Image: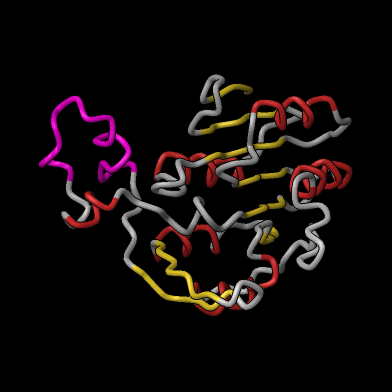
Amino acid sequence: MGRPLLFIDFDGVINQFPDPKVMRRQGTTDWMRPDDPRRAAYATDNWFRPDRRERLLVHDLGRRFTIRWNAELVARLDALDADKWWLSTWQPETAQLNRALGVDWPTVQWYDPTTREGIWTGKRRTILDALAQNRPIVWLDDEETTYNAGLAIQATPHEAPVLGVGPDSAIGVGRPQMDLVEDFIHDPPAGPVVRFETAGDGHEGHWGF
């Protein structure tokens, strides 16, 4: 197998959308009821709490957006021995993302920003096309790593393993998920196996090898 490929979405993966109440309380959870489902998501052993923030101008919308991320998470992604690619609707603005995050990841041109052609199918098509390279693939996306996407990957001939990770968009990639990605990149499983670990889309949160 060749060098692994890592396809990275931005919103809900690196850019977090935490619960406003959690943010107002400096990311703590001790104020929550014991049965509050948010406790597990925002636990220190699960959440890369955001420690960076910036406002970026999205030119085609003429608006500025606040982005929040965790520097440790970005550093661990950047350190992976893999070819890293942005696969995000921020496609026209990834030069700004690279500058803000301190990385230099190239961008997959998967849709037409003017006509929006490919916006609904381009991400999955990118992954399916990449299977032909017979290189291990990691796909990080909070919306597109669905059960049906996994079935489409399984049904497409390929020789190398695929790991899909679908984070909870409130917190982005969690610590256990990042550990899983690092293990996969360091020692990919043999064969064309497929594994998805997702925050849930109406199916099991994990399946595969």
Asked if the stretch drawn in magenta spans residue 45, the answer is yes
Question: Residue sitting at 17 percent across and 43 percent down?
Answer: 29
In this view of the protein, which residue sits in the foreground, 135 or 10?
Answer: 10
Percent across and percent down for residue 11 are 53, 56
Question: Residue sitting at 16 percent across and 54 percent down?
Answer: 25
Asked if the stretch drawn in magenta spans residue 64, the answer is no
Colour scheme in use: secondary structure
Q: Main secondary structure of the magenta part?
A: loop
Percent across and percent down for residue 201 are 55, 28
Above or below: residue 170 compared with residue 103: above
In this view of the protein, which residue sits in the foreground, 73 or 152?
Answer: 152
Answer yes or no: is residue 1 visible.
no
Question: Residue sitting at 50 percent across and 76 percent down?
Answer: 56
Percent across and percent down for residue 187 are 62, 41
Q: Give the extent of the magenta segment.
A: 29-46
Quadrant for residue 147, please give it.
top right
Percent across and percent down for residue 84 are 66, 60
Above or below: residue 207 compared with residue 167: above
Above or below: residue 171 compared with residue 199: below
Quadrant for residue 154, please give it.
top right
Query: In the displayed structure, does residue 203 sit left or right of residue 171?
Result: right
Query: In the displayed structure, does residue 127 sit left or right of residue 33?
Result: right
Answer yes or no: is residue 208 visible.
yes
